[in-house]
Image: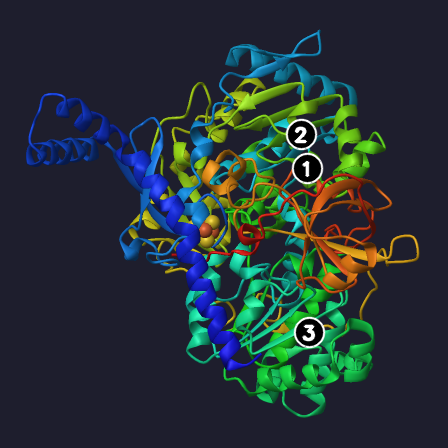
Amino acid sequence: MSDLERTRGFERDDEARKKGVAGMMQRAKERALRNVEHVAEAVAADTMTEGQLFDVATSVGDKRLSELTVRDTTCGYCAVGCRFDLYSDGEEILATRPTDPEKAPVNGISTCVKGKFSYGFVNSEDRLDLPLVRGEDGEFHEVSWDEAYERVVEGFQGVIDEYGGEAMSVIASSKATNEENYLMGKFARQVLGTNTVDNCNRLCHSSTVAGLARTLGYGAASVSVRDIEQTDCYLLTGSNTTEAHPVIATRIKQNVRDGADLLVFDPRKVQIAEYATQFSQVKPGYDAVWINGLIRHIVNEGLYDEAFVEERTTGFDDVVEAVQEFTPERVEEVAGVPSEEIVSAAETIAAADTCVFGWTLGLTEHSHGTENVVAMANLAAITGNLGKPGAGVSPFRGQNNVQGGGGDMGPLPDNFPGYQKVVDDEVRAKFEEAWDCDISPEPGYYTTDMFLAADRGDLRGMYCIGENPALSEPGVNHAEKVLSELDFLVVQDIFENSTSKFADVILPACSFVEKTGTFTNTDRRVQMVKKVMEPKGHSKPDWVILQELANRMGRDWDYADTAEIMEEMRTLTPIYGGVTQERVEAENGLQWPCYDLEHPGTVRLYEDEFNTDDGLAHLEGIGYSEPAELPDEDYPLTLTTGRVLYQYHTGTMTHREPGIMEYTGSDFVEIHPKTAAAYGIEDGDVVRIESRRGEITVPAQVTERPGEDNVFVPMHFAESAVNRLTDEEHLDPDASTPEFKVSAVRITPEEGESVPIERDAIEREAGDD
Ligand code: SF4
């Protein structure tokens, strides 16, 4: 890409940003000022002068401001961890404003459209109010909390009495706070008697966690956002950064504008590629191939960091041997990356003083995602890009609290909080004593395995908190069948959703603006979340519901607030040993590991040693595995799935914000122009997409973004539910992550009229502002 093209890319982005955000900003202002205008209109009837009217409006506005609750809090959308002030009149969220930049170490004054504007869900008319219990007529009926708890206890106890606690399962919520997730793990083990507790991490970065834990020691980003801002070079792969992590993308773009190199490897020409010094379009499912190709060139040409390898790693010889088959020619043949691009990318990384290796789900959501991550860790280590400023591995986490709630807090079948192993007798004894219960040394099922186990009859009951597996699991036709056949299902959420259709009881929870606690963001930073308004209707925070249920099931929990929960958790969790809410507030966040109350937290991992038994990085020579399902005559195209900027996950929150829905309000499939022409498909035509597991129909967007052999569908829409097409059976052997990024499909134009696509809206991709 020429400099001119890149400059134009920056300019287009700025224009799109202004255009996209301006409309929403206007609507938000109008809403905030509505009451003031009504008062001014009434006064006008009394024939006041314009000046007097202005004075009245100003004083009314000031009075309203003094009546508002304003809290600095952490965004509840993605894991970038932006902080800002939220304004509420007790009824609704009126506005967001930048907070003191000291309190917002990740984003300063920046936010994206979701964090800034998408709060319509809080007051949505269909917010759950009272608990719902399914009656004998098969319908849901509103009941009191007491009646609902009675039914839940009866249902859980029924499963436990008949099949044992291990027939129960819990899906925890990475949207909820750290404190609540700690309780979800405790509830599963202490109250229900099962290790089968897991969360959405299984569907996204669990292969990151597995791959990094076994090579470097911690399943987390080694860098801070500051390193990302300052590095000399980026290797980004499988990361639609501008849409999924907009504020981080802006930091990257600024740094590239200032001269950093940006290498993007992706099957789809995502927007960040427009800013790249090199974009390489790869065949989906062959990431270990091109990464091994980079390593081969670097070691064979003597471009690796010899001193780092010698002093801080083991396994280098195995890596060198394993990568020899990945010649540039072979990489081109298997992964589709031209050999000269492998050579130039390898030499750019080797020449850079520092490099950040960033990825999202394009690297991990595979039947061999862990293998890909190990290859990336090898590459970072042999180039000495770990444990120093501006260098490291940076898996960008998705859900707001998937790092903390999805992993650190231990709602995991094999780990207690802080990644302490269930199979470790000493660790287990510690938790048995603290929680006053017996805990099986046998790990429970991962989420994806839960659905297979339930299908076999090995799981009978499920407590699903703040997740929507009927839309997010791979192969949702299968997931729906499993959910409908469970003996007892409780769904706890802020809305009814695709999963609650199958529930016996639905419990109304509240959102992050209605409770206090902490989230941990993508760079391991624990930050405060603060209540700005009371829970809507009769809804309750997850931790309150868990406590009330635990006590009705014979336990004696008496947490007065989430600070007390944090206090208990930290005493059991070495990497959070010094984390209290008081310190998080006073120190504007703390990055783990933070071992005790005097420890300052850890800005950058591995500066002195790796978190392994010998303190060295354990490199592993690995080859590559084929995707589980390859295109063939019947299903000749490869489907990949992913996110768009204006939506969030299964849309539970963003679908309720009219401003957001104006931008990308429905599903679509991206098809390359040559492929579209071959099938007689035009922009806007409705297309049937079929895999071996199901079919969906969506309008086509004809674009060069996907390669000719691939199609792309976003994952956010229940109506089309792209996961009807994905595969629930072929999982990563280490992490049980599904292969969302490779499914063999075929496409057929549907009869009937074209659905007009707002190309402008779909292609417009505002960054932060
Ligand atoms: Fe929230 Fe957007 Fe920041 Fe993510 S990038 S934390 S969605 S404001």
Residue type marked 2: Thr
The answer for how far apart the CA atoms under marks 2 and 1 are is: 7 Å
Q: Earlier in the sequence, mark 2 or mark 1?
A: 1
Element at label 1: helix
Residue 178 visible = yes
User: Residue at 55% across / 59% down in the picture?
Assistant: 396
Report the residue marked by disc 2: 499
- Of labels 2 and 3, the one closer to you: 2
Q: Which mark is residue 67?
A: none
Element at label 2: loop
Q: Earlier in the sequence, mark 2 or mark 3?
A: 2
How many numbered circles does the render carry?
Answer: 3
Whole-percent x and y of residue 277? 56, 78
Q: What crowding class fits label 1: few (fewer than 14 Cα within 10 Å), some (14-19), or many (20 or more)?
A: many
Residue 651 is left or right of residue 71, and the answer is: right
Residue 36 is left or right of residue 637, and the answer is: left
Report the residue marked by disc 3: 619
Image quadrant where one finds the N terminus:
bottom right
